[in-house]
């Protein structure tokens, strides 16, 4: 393989596009669905929900991603959220990457958040990189819908036409090793994701080159 050094970050010419979570099609969409919908999963059992974006032409995705979600739980006063971004080939098979500690089964990138620590640092946050304040705990009530913004660690991946970017959301580790292993969570019940309509849940994606969402 080859290594290319870049003097600037984010990469010059990067265009950020919001891909909205579409509950009906379990997809990422360049336009926000007009109707509100809810997708739920059992956070205690490690269930996962996935949303895909299929590339119509080659593209490079390089930089930070930001995931905004509107979330609620039916039990307890807090939530642990785990997300991963994966690459799928044209046949739908995951393309894995070598991660920390030479683990060969890593995703494109990942992120995690405890909802009670959702407050952002306005001085340090940027649209594509939310930075948590970690100065207070904000518990929630069952059924209360709150917005959260999650940083997804920076990465660089090329996609060919027909390949997919997959967003995975769960209440447990999606990818774990000695560096990333959250054995205990605060989850008690089912998590709900609130999408479309009044809920602008979306993944902000850095398109460095190639095809971009219309």
Image (cartoon, rainbow, N blue to C red):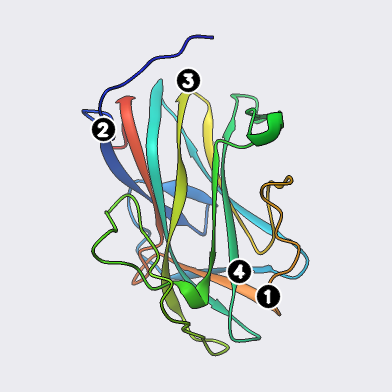
Task: Report the disc number at residue 14.
Answer: 2
- Whether residues under marks 2 and 3 lie with C-beta atoms below 8 angstroms apart, the answer is no
Residue 92 horizontal/vertical position (percent): 65, 31
Q: CA distance from mark 3 to mark 4?
A: 33 Å
* Mark 3 secondary-structure assignment: loop
Residue at disc 4, secondary structure: strand
**Numbered tag placed on residue 80 in the rendering:** 4
Label located before the other in sequence (2 or 3): 2
Q: What is the crowding at mark 3: few (fewer than 14 residues within 10 Å), some, or many (at least 20)?
A: some
Of residues 68 and 161, the one drawn nearer to the viewer in this rendering: 68
Determine which residue is flagged by label 1.
187
State which mark lies toward you, 3 or 1.
1
Callout 1–callout 4 Cβ contact below 8 Å: yes
Picture layout, residue 171 above or below residue 127: below
Residue at 65% from the left image edge and 25% from the top image edge? 91
Q: Earlier in the sequence, mark 4 or mark 2?
A: 2
State the image coordinates of residue 82 (x, y, percent, origin top left): 60, 58
Dot 2: element: loop
What number of labels is visible?
A: 4
Q: Of tags 3 and 4, which is closer to the observer?
A: 4
Q: Earlier in the sequence, mark 1 or mark 2?
A: 2
Q: Is residue 180 left or right of residue 127?
A: right
Query: Callout 4: few (<14), some (14-19), or many (20+) C-alpha neighbours within 10 Å?
Result: many
Question: Considering only order in the chain, which callout, 4 or 1, is on the residue closer to the N terminus?
Answer: 4
Q: Residue 88, position in %: x, y? A: 60, 31
Residue found at the very far bottom of the displayed protein: 141
Distance (Cα) linking label 3 and label 1: 38 Å
Task: Say few, some or many: other residues with alpha carbon within 10 Å of mark 1 (under 14 / 14 to 19 / 20 or more).
Answer: many
Work out whether 187 lies above or below 112.
below
Q: Quadrant of the N terminus?
A: top right
Residue 166 appears left or right of 200: right
Mark 3 lies on residue? 160
């Amino acid at each position: 393989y080859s290594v290319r050094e870049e003097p600037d970050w984010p990469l010059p010419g990067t265009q950020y596009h919001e891909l909205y979570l579409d509950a009906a099609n379990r997809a990422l969409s360049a336009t926000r669905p007009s109707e509100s919908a809810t997708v739920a999963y059992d956070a205690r059992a490690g269930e996962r929900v996935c949303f895909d974006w299929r590339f119509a032409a080659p593209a490079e995705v390089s930089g930070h991603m930001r995931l905004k979600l509107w979330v609620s739980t039916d039990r307890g006063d807090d939530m642990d959220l785990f997300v991963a971004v994966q690459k799928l080939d044209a046949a739908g098979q995951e393309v894995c990457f070598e991660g920390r500690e030479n683990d060969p089964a890593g995703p494109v990138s990942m992120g995690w958040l405890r909802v009670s620590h959702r407050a952002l640092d306005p001085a340090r946050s940027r649209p594509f990189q939310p930075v948590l304040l970690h100065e207070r705990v904000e518990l929630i009530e069952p059924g209360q819908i709150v917005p959260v913004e999650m940083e997804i660690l920076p990465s660089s991946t090329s996609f060919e036409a027909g390949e997919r970017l997959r967003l995975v959301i769960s209440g447990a580790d999606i990818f774990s090793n000695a560096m990333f292993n959250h054995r205990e969570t605060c989850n008690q019940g089912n998590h709900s994701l609130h999408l479309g309509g009044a809920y602008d849940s979306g993944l902000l994606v850095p398109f460095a080159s190639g095809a971009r969402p219309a």
